[in-house]
Amino acid sequence: MTRRLAVVCSLGTLFLAGIIASPNIARASSASRQEAATSKTCDRECLNGFVDRYLDAVVAHDPSRLPVTKFVKFTENGQQLVLGDGFWRSATGRGTYKFYVDDPEAGEVGFEGTMQEAGANNGSDPVILALRLKIEDRQISEVETIVARGQFAQGGAKNLEKLSGPRPAFLEDIPPAERVSRLDLIKTANKYFSGMQQDDGKGDYSFFADDCNRLENGMQTTNNLAPMPGLTASGTPRPAPSAKYDPADKPTMYSSGWSCRDQFRSGLLHFVTRIRDRRYPIVDQERGIVFSFTFFDHSAGGTRNFQTPDGRAITAGPTTPFTWEIAEIFKVRKGQLHEIEAVLTQSPYGMGSGWSGWEESRSDQPQW
């Protein structure tokens, strides 16, 4: 027993002596682990590179060009498809408008941009694409897309390409001393949805900055005095927007000429019955950007009847049940919204995103 103990002690002494004599062994092991972890992370340049590779593969109609996980999941306009189906078959080219939102911490990247799709007579039509990619171990594991088509989106795509790139405020870094947590950024963005849902014009809308502006499918829908394209529900041209919200004018529709805050103060957005399945997968803390996905339900029927803040009875909104599927991007600074940009397409009423459970897809509570 004594001899066995002596041998064990001797071996232990030799082991310790080896470590003491070669301290770099532990350091090398730690460095190797760190290098391995670093090789799997994806910074801004890496994330944006995955977006470009994805879009190039779409135009080439060849998903085999992409490094994807075994169980990669792909949705287009809320419908789960096989990667390579849907817009992959009809895309003809990339556009010039490119807006990347990077979240290296989550390994996710969002993108809004213009694309070209096969049109009539062998032509191409412009579309607007919202894209979310999740990157794991330098492979794509999730792909979520919204493709906005039609006259509204075509005109908006041309407007976006005139801008050449995102509005400068989106690209400005937030000074380090002003940066807040991911949760705080999401909470500010969520005030927009909560304020719009069954808006009564009586809420606290101080979360809007004075310079807040919004684009929807490339069309400026705040602070814009240009007539909006299309016709009213009665088939007549849309009237020129009013320049400023004034309750004394007794408006019956909100105006694209009003500010973000005044549109909410009017209470004329009440017909947006429910804003649900609120997901916030991409947050860029350095730039104060939140990239969200959600659905706007308009339940029609009796929900079209409501009162303005001054007590007037109004009937407004779609006459039949209607849902928008939306990707919405917010610029947040000092607890206020400065820029808003959305890509939206009509979906079957009440449809889910394909990324949430049934209860979550029905809920108007944010998914942190």
Image: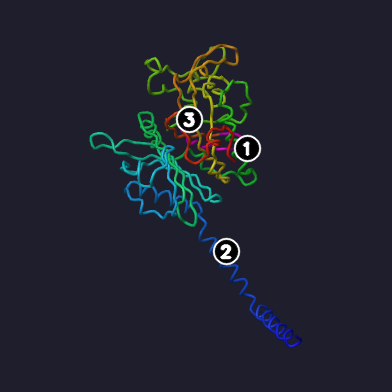
Are the residues tagged 2 and 1 within 8 Å (C-beta)?
Answer: no
User: Residue 148: percent from the left, percent from the top?
Assistant: 39, 34
* Marks 3, 1: nearer the viewer: 3
Circle 3: element type:
loop
Residue lying at the far right of the rendered structure = 2
Q: Which amino acid does label 2 sit on?
A: Gln
Expressed as whole percent of the image width and height from the top left, the position of residue 232 reads 40, 18
Which residue appears at 54% of the width and 38% of the height? 331
Secondary structure under tag 2 reads helix
Is 52 on the left or on the right of 337, as rendered? left
The residue lying toward the viewer, choosing from 92 and 155, is 92
- Location of the C terminus by quadrant is top right
> What secondary structure is the stretch in magenta mostly built from?
strand
Q: Nearer the viewer, mark 2 or mark 3?
A: 3
Instruction: Kindly identify which residue carries mark 2.
Output: 34
Q: Does the magenta stretch include residue 76?
A: no
Per the image, label 1 sits on a secondary structure element best described as: loop
In the rendered structure, which segment of residues is drawn in magenta? Answer: 323-337
Membership of 329 in magenta stretch? yes
Image mark for residue 334: 1
Q: Measured from the top left, where is residue 244 in percent x and y?
A: 53, 19
Q: Nearer the viewer, residue 5 or 364?
A: 5
* Front residue of this view, candidates 341 and 87: 87
Estimate how packed mark 2 is, as few (under 14), some (14 to 19) or many (20 or more) residues with alpha carbons within 10 Å: few
Looking at the image, is mark 2 or mark 1 earlier in the sequence?
Answer: 2
| Mark 2–mark 1 distance (CA, rounded to whole Å) | 35 Å
Q: Which of marks 3 and 1 is nearer the N terminus?
A: 1
The residue singled out by tag 3 in the image is 350
Whole-percent x and y of residue 265? 58, 21
